[in-house]
Amino acid sequence: MTDLSSFAELASRDHGLCVFSTLRSDGSIQASVVNAGVLAHPLTGAQVVGLVAIGGSRKLRNLRADPRVSIVARAGWQWGAVDGTAEIIGPDDSHPAVDGEALRVLLRNVFKAAGGTHDDWDTYDRVMAEERRAAVLIAPSRIYSNPEAR
């Protein structure tokens, strides 16, 4: 596995479920299961791994202190990992080029990239705003996997 398209295909085989690891302030690893997918960065167009995190979560606190991350997708015995640097864009981590409308669209795009669908996008948008959800965009520095399972 050498590119994000392989990671995206692998993640899609298990509904975008991935193990996401951040670093705690004491240097230990904090892991959680998230839905993630590959999409174009909304400002640079570069391919990134994206996920949506609830406001006030430990993963966001960890990322603010140290943006280094690892995310692993798996399906059966095949797995792929992306190590990189995370960027947070959300109501508590604003970006000068991303206004409220652009954030609403970004959160939808990340959700869709992770395989999500919704019957009521207005409700989705409302809940994202109420929960102060943020997009986490991972710029890959290393992409790797195990050999193809036989």
Image (spheres, rainbow, N blue to C red):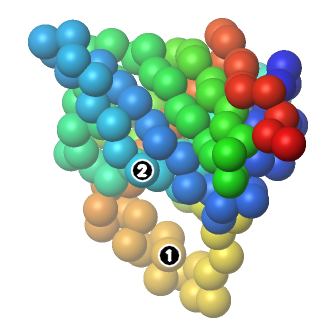
Q: Residues within 10 Å of mark 1 (few under 14, many from 20)?
A: some
The mark that comes first in sequence, 1 or 2, is: 2
The answer to whether residue 104 is left or right of residue 126 is: right
- Residue plotted at (21% across, 17% down): 28
- Residue plotted at (42% across, 74% down): 126
* Residue 2 position (above or below residue 114): above
The answer to whether residue 67 is left or right of residue 42 is: left
- Return the x and y of residue 109 as percentages of the image width and height: 68, 55
- Return the x and y of residue 85 as percentages of the image width and height: 53, 16
Residue kind at label 2, given as amino acid type:
Val
Q: Distance from label 1 to label 2 (Cα)?
A: 20 Å
| Mark identifier at residue 60 | none
The answer to whether residue 102 is left or right of residue 31 is: right
- Return the x and y of residue 46 as percentages of the image width and height: 79, 24
- Helix, strand or loop for disc 2: strand
- In the rendered image, the quadrant that contains the C terminus is top right
Q: Residue furthest bottom?
A: 119
The answer to whether residue 27 is seen in the rendering is yes
| Mark identifier at residue 33 | 2
